[in-house]
Image: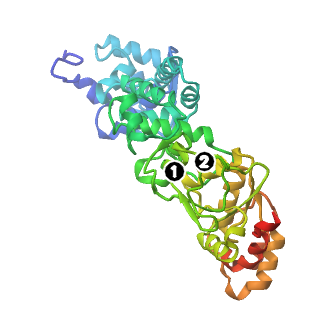
Amino acid sequence: MSEVIDSDGWIDARLQRLLGGDELAALRKRLRRRFERAPNDTPIEYIRINGLTEKEHAALASLLGRPQRYANSLQIDVSLVDTALQRAGIASSLCGALEQLDGPIANLAAERLREEHFWSRVIEGCTHPDLADFLRAPEGPRLLKRLTGQDSQDSRAIDLCRGAECVLSRLPEKGIARSQLAAEVLGNAHALDNGEPVATIVLAVRRRLARQPGDDETIDLTAEPQQVASEQPIRDIWARAGVLVNELARPALFLNVPIDASESNSWHDGEPSYRSLRVLLRSPPSWHVAGRKVFVCENPNILAIAADHWGRDCAPLICTDGMPAAAQQCLLSQLALGGARLLYHGDFDWPGLRIGNYVMREFGAEPWRFDVTDYIAAVRAVSNSGHHLQGKTTEAVWDTALASAMQQHQLAIAEEAVAPSLLRDLDGRLT
């Protein structure tokens, strides 16, 4: 009698004849699946296999000692098969025989239990509540598995969590450079660069904290790196945490926004001015805006037109320059916290409505000549200068009728086309 399996990996020839070979590979796969899905620590008593081929039925009948009369289904008494294989010295059990032929069979229930215990230990070891909440959500373990590129039980996952926890405990900062934060906390100035594992976890946690229902303006930082189309949303998330990444990019543009009289005004009244994210975070002005209207436009041309028309007499006006980037968000946040009444206007198109939703939701702005009545009036006044609406329809959170009217007329109207009506509101002598 040959050995069941020797040190060189040879399998008993009788087992090969019973269940081996390519013709029975599908049957073995189905049997393995039943063992994989078995409840943890619960033996399988019976297995029913349907849709059998003649050769598959013959193989199972041989194992059970039954007549070879073909039927397309068969119920296997697992304990009888186990006993028969043991007595013949072929294998310790049916499960053992399948493992000899095709490798180890994982018990999915046991694996799930081990994974639950692992994540429980990781979460229990977290002292930062936001990271612990992230790990309790489905995307947390999913992201960690992708970042480690290994089994979740590996200590690499724990090390990444500890690094992220150290960074999160420092946030929010007040204008520290990302490289400096990385060097101080992680000992490597590049450890928080885009795509680095700890940076990815920190960004995912911070984004989850800021996520709002229906939020579709920011990227999914748990996605594969090649799916991240722009670095701008990443800079914005860092900026909201007081961390500077390319802090001189896309400075905030504004006109006649007053500061406290005790501070020197370094920009000229009546002329457009810029402030970088670096300055806004490190040396924030004392904005003198409590209870005052501050108008917000989407396009820089509107601010230039207002400066030309009103000069020093223009009401306070700032520009988002499209979807607000880090510097624009910082300025809007400072003005809102300073008690300003923010009034927003943008393009009458779908991106314009998305920007409006964001500004009103995040900074408590109100619509400024930006509802369905204003759109209809603009259509009548400037229909020859409009263009066809394109892109995905967006509902305006401030006016449920606006999107329907825009769909009906299918006309997009740029902000510049309605500049005369906006200029009337920007007479600073009346505000």
User: Residue 24 lies in what quarter of the image?
Assistant: top left
Location of residue 245 in the rendering, given as x and y in whole percent from the top left corner: 44, 47
| Front-most of residues 68 and 241 | 241
User: Residue sitting at 66 percent across and 66 percent down?
Assistant: 352
Q: Nearer the viewer, mark 2 or mark 1?
A: 2
| Front-most of residues 157 and 402 | 402
Q: In the drawing, does residue 375 fall left or right of residue 334? A: right
Q: Quadrant location of the C terminus?
A: bottom right
Q: Is residue 37 visible?
A: yes
Q: Quadrant location of the N terminus?
A: top left
Rounded to the nearest angstrom, the CA distance separating label 2 from label 1 is 12 Å
Q: Earlier in the sequence, mark 2 or mark 1?
A: 1
Location of residue 184 in the rendering, given as x and y in whole percent from the top left corner: 38, 30
Q: Disc 1 marks which amino acid?
A: Leu
Q: Mark 2: which secondary structure? A: loop
Q: Circle 2 is placed at which residue position?
A: 285
Mark 2, Cα crowd under 10 Å, few <14 / some 14-19 / many 20+, is some
Location of residue 240 in the rendering, given as x and y in whole percent from the top left corner: 56, 43
Which mark is on residue 277? 1
Q: In the drawing, does residue 101 fall left or right of residue 311? A: left
Q: Disc 2 marks which amino acid?
A: Pro
Which mark is on residue 322? none
Location of residue 99 in the rendering, given as x and y in whole percent from the top left corner: 33, 24
User: Residue sitting at 46 percent across and 26 percent down?
Assistant: 166
User: Residue sitting at 70 percent across and 61 percent down?
Assistant: 316
Mark 1, Cα crowd under 10 Å, few <14 / some 14-19 / many 20+, is many
| Front-most of residues 203 and 318 | 318
**Above or below, comparing residue 297 to residue 421 in the picture:** above
